[in-house]
Image (cartoon, rainbow, N blue to C red):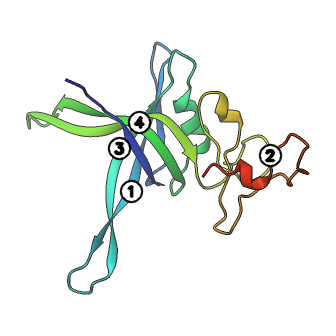
Amino acid sequence: MANLNKVMLIGRLTRDPEVRTFSNGGKVAKFGFAVNNRKKNQATGAWEDMPCYLDVKAFNRETGRKLADTVEQYLRKGMQVYFEGHLLMEEWEDKNGGGKRSKLVVVLDDMQFLDGRPEGATGGGSAPMRASGPAARTPAPAYDGGSSFNDEPEPMEHGSGSPTKEEEIPF
């Protein structure tokens, strides 16, 4: 039987990250996150946003990915971010004798800043950045809502071996 546990979200942080360091050198950053679902109000006929609040955790991995460090350094309440992650059911005993408790959390696997370059990041411009892997140092194109991407190179003359603006657009 096949299984798939993958979450992709765009939303905003509802609180600043809280960071804990473990005795073995590991680190986790926890924060709140909200995404909106759209629902049509039957009385008015207008579309309304219905927020869905989530708890997210980012870990520093032994394989070199330091997502907890990135979250701690760059993310703040209110920032818009794209996340990829997976779901994890956390279970614990209630301190007040209420029995077993549980909640579903998102464990962060990858992220991209959508509010422009975070303060303290290197390089110029205001393009979103990926937070892990080799792309962490390479800004992604930012769409300004107009007819072209920000920070595009000028088109080259045909025959120069370089693509024109139209050929660079990925869709």
Mark 4 or mark 2: which comes first in sequence? Answer: 4
Q: Which residue is mark 4?
A: 85
Mark 3–mark 1 Cα distance, whole angstroms, equals: 11 Å
Q: What is the residue that sits farthest to the top in this orientation?
A: 24
Front residue of 31/163: it is 163
Residue 40 as seen in the image, left or right of residue 30:
left
Residue 121 placement: quadrant: top right
Front residue of 125/22: it is 125
Mark 1 or mark 2: which comes first in sequence? Answer: 1
Mark 2 or mark 3: which comes first in sequence? Answer: 3
Residue depicted at x 83% and y 51%: 153
Mark in the foreground, 4 or 3: 4
The amino acid sitting under disc 4 is: Gly
The amino acid sitting under disc 1 is: Val
The amino acid sitting under disc 2 is: Pro
Tell me if mark 2 has few (under 14), some (14-19) or many (20+) residues whose alpha carbon lies within 10 angstroms of its own: some
Q: Are marks 2 and 3 in contact (CB under 8 Å)?
A: no
Q: How many marks?
A: 4
Tell me if mark 4 has few (under 14), some (14-19) or many (20+) residues whose alpha carbon lies within 10 angstroms of its own: many
Q: Which residue is mark 1?
A: 35
Tell me if mark 1 has few (under 14), some (14-19) or many (20+) residues whose alpha carbon lies within 10 angstroms of its own: some
Q: Which residue is mark 2?
A: 163
Mark 3 or mark 1: which comes first in sequence? Answer: 1
Q: Secondary structure at mark 4?
A: strand
Q: Secondary structure at mark 1?
A: strand
Mark 1–mark 2 Cα distance, whole angstroms, equals: 37 Å
Mark 4 or mark 3: which comes first in sequence? Answer: 3
Residue 22 as seen in the image, left or right of residue 134:
left
